[in-house]
Image (cartoon, grey):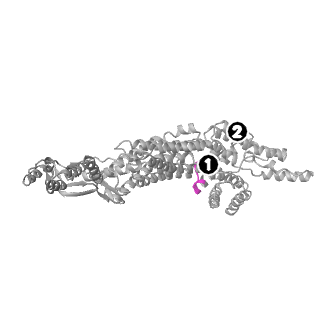
Amino acid sequence: MLKRTVLLILTAVIITALLPFEGLSGLSTKLGQVWERPTLIAPFDVPILKTRKQIESDTEKINSSYTPVYRLDTLFAAKASPKLQEIYHRGVLQQSEWDKNQNNNIRIVNGNDLKTVPTIEVYSTNSAIDTLRAIEAQTRVVANLVYDEELNNAFKHDELKELSNTRGIVRAGEILIANNELIDQPKKLLLDSYLGIYHQRVGSQSAWIWSTLGRFLVVLMILLVNIAFLRRIDGFRKNDPFKPLVFTFLLYLLVVGMVALSLQFDRISPLVVPLPIVAVYLLMFFNLRVAVYGNLSITLICSLFVQNPTEFVLINFLAGMVAIYMMRNIYHRADFFKAIGAIFAVEMATVIAVELTASASLSMDTAYNIIYLIVNNLALLAMYQAVYLIEKLFKFVSDLTLLELSDTNQKLLLNLAQKAPGTFQHTLQVANLAEGAAAAIGAKPLLARCGALYHDIGKMQNPFYYAENLSGSFNPHNDLMPLQSAELIKAHVTDGAEIARKQGIPQIIIDFIEQHHGNSLIFFFYSKALELAKQNGQAEVNESDFRYPGVNPKSKETSICMMADSVEAASRSLPSYEKEPLEKLVDKIIDTQIREGLLNNSELTFAEVGQVKTFFKQKLNNIYHGRIAYPARKEE
């Protein structure tokens, strides 16, 4: 539990750290370029910022139209003549100040009173002297309107502070710039305004913390569900349940790292990254359910890196699902190339459909995206070659390995054919039944076939104690006690598992050996023991002594193998191979297994069990169909 938790948190932290914080990686606002990204919609109100020149011009206008403030000093009027007092009360400016402002207004502060007057209504030092000369001999006048620098600075600061840095606004939901639109000066200003406000919103430390936490939680929740899916893989639950989780998260980190790297280059699209490889690997090594969720997981995680996640998710999710569908059962190398072709076709069709939906026409962007998709599929083809290395490193089993193991020229199968030819023929029939039934319900037919071929290899140890290897009337069990016979019969399960392990057979195949009988009762010898005990007046027979030492099947494929094994073996003992007896036999055997609880742990549904029954009936009727009696030739 601790290892899984540490791995989960560490993976989520690394992915979150790789995420571009602004969410606008590679955004270019160069003048004269074409906006190659999808249409940008304002997520919030965007005030349009003024250029530096506009702000400087507005500042200059404020400075040029600024009304200066002068403080009126009334101390001069105390000892002055009545006329001079009148002049001082109106105010006297230095001649240079009066000349500078004669066509404008000035503001005069007198105590707490502030008023604005035309400059021509106050005296200059020269006009005050001229006025006095006409009335009295005194001609000395001092300017009593003094420029208050501190007050003027405060007023200027207030006016500049109220100066608006914007010129209009784009409301949330309106288009900032459309796809393929030229970035002219107004659009550049608009985009720069948007980026400036965006960075202000996410640039603060608190905003960064909350934004990062949100991204971390999103990634964490997606990864958390992966653990739930992977815990249901039976083969790994028994051995090393940590390995599939490590592999899956490393695979996610690899793909996420490739997406993050692609965003560092302006002319490279994230579409070059082969996201479907995640679905391919998870399908090959695990199962369909894990592959589907893995495809969804990596698509959602990588969509956090791009500016237009809807298009990205649509293209890659569909490509991954096509990969899963095309590669669910691969028997030939050509099948993979067909799958690559189908993936590329779906990706290309989706790109074209999205482009037509967005702009009702195709552009050079479409051609570039198709080139990216070609690189994508070439990379997918290259990464597929790493299957062998992954198998050896993580001890996984792919369809390619199953194909190799299904070759009847394999050493173990050759030995089985030589030492127990009857058992070998039996396993071939069981393999055919299991493969067809698995295909009928959407399970893994190749796994079912391979497991069925090896399920009875333990019979090589004592082949003549099994009915299919006997001929004539000789039966070694006639000389044995029922318990001895049962022990010999049970041994083929434990012997088979031991032989398989020594030969390096994967655990997923050994499961078929250990589970194809479950813990079912060896009814023939148990009944014989009961009858013998009754005749001899012995104590009750211990039923557990006559049960197989295996565990009940858990996967669909091992469950099918158990049913196919019992049905095929029992069908050989029928006195008649008419359709009705065969079908009754199939129903009886499988219904008994259900009633005894042998399928309680199976992933099979009742509907799938019904489909398996139907397939077995059709297949057995084909195998044991009646033949035409050919007339004997007469000797001439």
Residue 348: x percent and y percent? 38, 52
One can see residue 475 in this view: no
Q: Read off the magenta span.
A: 438-449
Residue 623 percent location from the top left of the image? 64, 55
Percent x, y for residue 27? 34, 47
**Badge 1: residue crowd in 10 Å (few <14, some 14–19, many ≥20):** some
Q: Position of residue 550 (x, y in %)?
A: 72, 47
Q: Is residue 340 magenta?
A: no
Mark seen at residue 231: 1
Q: Which mark is residue 498?
A: 2
Left/right placement of residue 213 relative to residue 497 reads left
Among all residues in the image, which is located at the extreme right? 537
Q: So how many labels did they put on this image? A: 2
Q: Give the residue drawn at x 47%, y 43%.
A: 17
CA separation, marks 2 and 1? 26 Å
User: Which secondary structure, mark 1?
Assistant: loop
Report the disc number at residue 325.
none
Q: Residue at x 83, y 47 (%)?
A: 482
From the image, which quarter does the N terminus lie in? top right
